Image: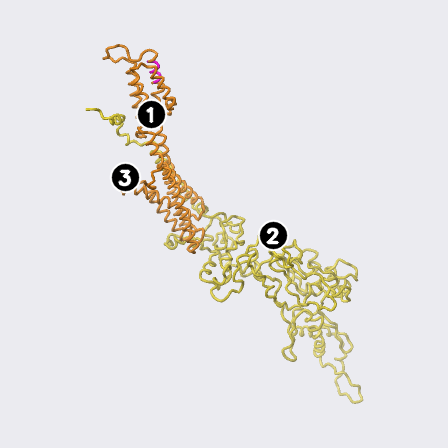
Amino acid sequence: MPRSPSRDLSDRFTGNRAYFHRSEWMRRDRFLLAAVALILAGFWAVADVAAPNRVAYSFSHGPLANPHAAWENDCAACHVGFSTSDISVRSILNTRERWQAMTCEKCHLGAAHNDNLTASGREFNAQCSNCHHDHAGRNVSLVQLADTSCTHCHADLTANQAKGSPKCAAKVTNFVSDHPEFRPLTTPPDRKLKFSHSLHMNPGQAHVKGGQEAMTVAKLRQLAGEAAVKRYTASAQDSDLIQLDCASCHKLDSENGTSGYDKLKLALDAVGDPTRSVLPARAAGSTMLPINFEAHCRACHPLRAPDGASSGLVISGFDVPHRKQPDELTSEVNAGYLRSMVGKDLPALALPVGPGGMIDQPLATPARTLRDEANRLTSKAMPMLTTGDAGCAKCHDISPPAAKGGFAKIAPLPNYTVWFQAALFDHTSHRGATCATCHPGTGAAYTPPGTQLIEKEPVQILGIENCKACHSPSGTKVTLSDKTAISGGGVRHGCTDCHRYHNSDHGLQGRGAAAGVPPKPLGLADFLRGK
Amino acid sequence: MLVGKTRSVRGRVAVILFATVAITVVGIALAAIGSILGLWPWPPDPSSPVGVSLGFVAGLIVFFEMALLPRKRLRGKRLGNTRVWMWLHLWFGLVCLPVVIIHSGFGFGGPLSTATFVLFLLVTASGIWGLVMQQWLPERILAHVPHETIASQIDYVGEYHAAEASRVVQALVTAPPEAESAEPTVIGSQAAELLAFLDQLLIPYLQIGKRSGSPLASLTEGEQRFTRLRAAVPEVAVPAVERLHELADLRRQWDAQARMHFWLHNWLLIHLPLSVAMTTLMVLHAVKALKFW
């Protein structure tokens, strides 16, 4: 029988026929490596179980911002705890929402921004982390947010509002393209105060050059004393005109501890005004300190009851307080005259009361009492103090008495220390530019003959285009109010550069406002534990 | 064929690469369309409902892919058609790529998810590489190794052939006892040369192949050496030298086979261990993600 060729092939394995039972190196190494991989991955799991803090940290997206650094390794300080009993299909599929359930309100009182929202809007608002993204590094701001945090609603406020029409612009997507003009410019408020910046910036605050009414050093000294002179001018010549500048009245800081502060304090002390109540120790520097009569007006515009005459005696006038309605002022003036008359031997009061005869000279009707005399002097002084040229009406709107014998009413001044009621503006950050850069019409200007002084000035801030000159993407075409076309400066222009969502840090509320104080402030130990 | 009916290697490789890219692009495009329709944000958040759902889908696919391992260990149980298993392994593996990418939200996340994601990409890449090799090298082996043997037994068969070569040469240089003539077929310097060839070049080469450093590993060098050897031995010994030449040629084929076999299967040295590591980390990732996220 011939030998089959395939026998040669099988003969090769004589004595080695069970070779396939033995592992071949590539197969063996494959499983060996797989075992090594399994062990290494197992080590990872063991390490995670052994060091849960490390796991928690590894699951964070990054270091917490500086204000939260103390809770870097304590997730439960901010995040609501989650246990196995909370596991459900819904909780698993909505892990993001679960992890975003936080307890920010323990330390931060997030006042309502706008409750008039649709359900989805409310849901979005309820999650602090929808806007405030932590775990992005120590130096990342938690309040400088992407515009999308705001445009989530403001890009179409009508659609996101539950009822009614929006109280602000219905569509704003960014500062440059569709942000509306500042509200004080589109709906100018009634300032209820007569004041001309240009007049006060003139030399001597005169209407015309060389005007006799110009305020000189001598006049100021006579009106308010040496302290006021030192405050407003370095000049020693009596005939020199008083020249004001913006900083004469508008300050970002009381400069407590400086000579400037001391001069103002002396000026206020001289008339007995409460220094500390009108001069804060330190201000944030974002907005100008409030202008008030005592600190900024009284030196040149003293509010004083006139001298009176009674039976040939002079009853001295006296300073009267500011911020009084005519009815209150009447009592103050009356009391002032009484004080001035006490101790004076007034003939009017000394005349005997008795019958007169036809042969007698007619006598002036004597005052029956000191009160009657004070009332007389008061009734004579009050018109001068209220409606007179140096009285309330010089600056304030006054409505006539409602009834005969009643009192006129001074319109209270609205608070326009801060023009931007919904936005933040930091004057300190803009000190490199002159005031006139943004506040037109505040420079010196005489009143031309035949023209009327503008007593109630419009809102003297430039519009949004002026801001865009710097705050817009680099290269953006910007047309200024004087029609000058320039290229945008590239300075930041995000929503949160001017706006804050929460009322605790708002145009009209500083960071320290009560609206931001948490309901239950914690002790240090609990605070650090995030309890 | 698992990747199409084209008979061209180039065509099948193109199908694999195209399918990989197409499935990924289509998957991402579908996710983008869903986002445009307002079904989910873009990019999808890994912890959003759609992100978590995709994570579960990816996990299920990975578990199915890994089931191929016990399937192979239990091949005697006949757990379904092998071809179907491989087909599903391959295509589910490709579908898993966009699923995982979308689940990741186009990011890496923390250390664990990063490690898992990177391992997944390496596993996918090694799988695709292996699939390409599987399309190309079998045909190449068929064409270039007509006398293919069992790859793992090449060295053993080499030893067998070395013994045969030794017997052949000994028969030439020694006189068999039953021979009428006392003279061997090859004598003198020719015998010495033949023995030297056997001991120094042929035997080592047949035993361990190219690793021996023998010049016979080179086809050209081998041809020259055997040509010289044929000329050096008597005419009667030429058939024996031809057999030696044949054995050397076989070893050269098997060297080539061993090389191609290595490339045909070496991707599994990466694919399997990394798959095991990735699956383990994936489970850990899922547990921790659901706990911490």
Please name the amino acid that badge 1 sits on: Arg
Percent position of residue A351, x then y:
76, 82
Closest to the observer: B17 or A523? Answer: B17
Question: What numbered label is drawn on residue B75?
Answer: 3
| The chain in orange | B
One can see residue B173 in this view: yes
Residue type, label 3: Arg
Q: Residue furthest top?
A: B182
- Say what amino acid the circle numbered 2 marks: Gly
Q: Residues within 10 Å of mark 2 (few under 14, many from 20)?
A: some
What color does chain A have in the rendering?
yellow
Contact between labelled residues 3 and 2, with CB atoms less than 8 Å apart: no
Residue extending furthest left?
A1
Q: Of circles 1 and 2, which is in front?
A: 1
Please tell me the numbered disc located at residue A489: 2
Which of discs 2 and 3 lies nearer the camera? The answer is: 2
**Residue lying furthest bottom:** A358
* Secondary structure beneath label 1: helix
Question: Along the line of sight, which residue is nearer the eye, A126 or B127?
Answer: B127
Which residue is the site of mark 1?
B251
